[in-house]
Image: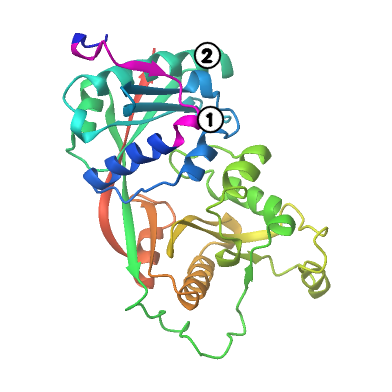
């Protein structure tokens, strides 16, 4: 229901013409709520054009005159999670316009559209709605609780500053190459599909994860303007011959790895200038316990430090089944904020 005080406001889908105003709103929310999630118009345009997103039906902008004061966006994943379809709710309200019922209006729209889209995409399958709350106890969390959501999982945002960071023992800058080193720079054309297969296996036992399709992987992950392949690393399984490793070079862009070739990987992005964000770290079950995640992540960080990056950040499941929290802490990351994922079953 629309608050009568907001009846004069205009409600429209988000279009490319709105990118500048949408960027202003998203970044104003990030500054006020101290989420650290700043965007550029190009990054938001990618979200509008992501596979499976219908701009006209899956986005909402509320305008007070020319000012976008609230927004909502919906994504329904292609894959199922534990037998459920997954509807991801996103949105926010201009800090100046809060406590006027706009958040309740956006979430009501998300419920309606989320239920309809999930039924179209996964008929007969129950649907879980998911919301990411950056600060437990915030007005966003109160809104979610008031709308039937419960706290499902906590995540830690971790950070390190390159001006004081030193690689852990065994990985020091200038140290001779280790005989067991396996880190290889990520080459999208040659390594992309094999890394997707590794990712889908590595995250099959992670809470909240759904399988990535080839289209989604190539568009949302590898195709993002924020993706930095030169700062990303993979480990190829040792059984592959030296000849194959040599063949898979930038001189032969048509050569690709077999689907089961990647043991572990680290994918890096740069959303803000000279701020590294480690978007994904994964290791296949067969290769866990061998220190590959540490090796690949340290090599990525060292390269970023050489290129003048000022800090690195990542997010981690507080109950990660692989013990990732402890790995990141040993490398030098420290927790800077805690987030919570809220969930409820859609009827």
Give the mark nearer the N terminus: 2 vs 1: 1
Check disc 2 and report the residue beneath it: 119
- The correct choice, above or below, for 330 with respect to 72 in the image is below
- Location of residue 78 (image quadrant): top right
User: Closest to the observer: 254 or 212?
Assistant: 254
Q: CA distance from mark 2 to mark 1?
A: 12 Å
User: Closest to the observer: 66 or 340?
Assistant: 66
- The magenta segment is 5-19
- Secondary structure of the residue carrying tag 2 is helix
**Magenta stretch encompasses residue 9:** yes
**Magenta stretch encompasses residue 124:** no
Q: Which mark is residue 180?
A: none
- Location of residue 322 (image quadrant): bottom left
User: Closest to the observer: 178 or 308?
Assistant: 308
User: Closest to the observer: 49 or 189?
Assistant: 49
Task: Please give the name of the residue rendered at 41% of the width and 22% of the height, measured from the top-left corner.
Answer: 60
Position of residue 345 measured from the top left corner of the image (x, y, whole percent): 37, 20
- Location of residue 22 (image quadrant): top left
């Amino acid at each position: 229901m629309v608050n009568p005080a907001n009846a004069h406001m205009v409600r429209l889908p988000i279009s490319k013409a709105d990118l500048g105003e949408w960027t202003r709103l998203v970044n104003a929310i990030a500054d006020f709520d101290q989420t650290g999630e700043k965007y550029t118009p190009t990054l938001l345009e990618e979200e509008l054009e992501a596979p499976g997103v219908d701009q006209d039906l899956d986005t909402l902008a509320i305008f007070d005159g020319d000012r976008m004061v609230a927004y909502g966006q919906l994504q329904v994943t292609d894959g199922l999670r534990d037998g459920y379809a997954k509807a991801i709710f996103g949105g926010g309200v201009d800090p100046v316009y809060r406590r006027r019922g706009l958040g309740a209006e956006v979430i009501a729209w998300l419920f309606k559209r989320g239920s309809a889209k999930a039924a179209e995409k996964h008929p007969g399958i129950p649907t879980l709605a998911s919301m990411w709350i950056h600060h437990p106890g915030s007005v966003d969390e109160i809104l979610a609780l008031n709308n039937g959501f419960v706290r499902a999982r906590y995540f830690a945002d971790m950070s390190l500053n390159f001006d004081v960071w030193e690689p852990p023992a065994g990985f020091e800058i200038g140290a001779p190459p280790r005989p067991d080193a396996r880190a290889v720079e990520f080459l999208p054309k040659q390594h992309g599909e094999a890394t997707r297969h590794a990712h889908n296996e590595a995250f099959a036992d992670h809470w909240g994860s759904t399988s990535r399709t080839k289209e989604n992987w190539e568009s949302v992950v590898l195709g993002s303007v924020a993706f930095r392949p030169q700062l990303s690393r993979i480990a190829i399984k040792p059984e592959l011959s030296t000849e194959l490793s040599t063949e898979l070079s930038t001189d032969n862009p048509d050569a690709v790895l077999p689907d089961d070739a990647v043991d572990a990987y680290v994918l890096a992005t740069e959303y803000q200038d000279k701020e590294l964000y480690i978007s994904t770290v994964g290791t296949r079950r067969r290769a866990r316990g061998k220190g590959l995640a540490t090796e690949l992540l340290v090599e990525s960080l060292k390269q970023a430090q050489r290129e003048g990056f000022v800090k690195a950040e990542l997010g981690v499941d507080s109950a990660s089944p692989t013990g990732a929290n402890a790995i990141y802490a040993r490398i030098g990351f420290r927790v800077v904020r805690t987030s919570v994922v809220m969930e409820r079953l859609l009827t």
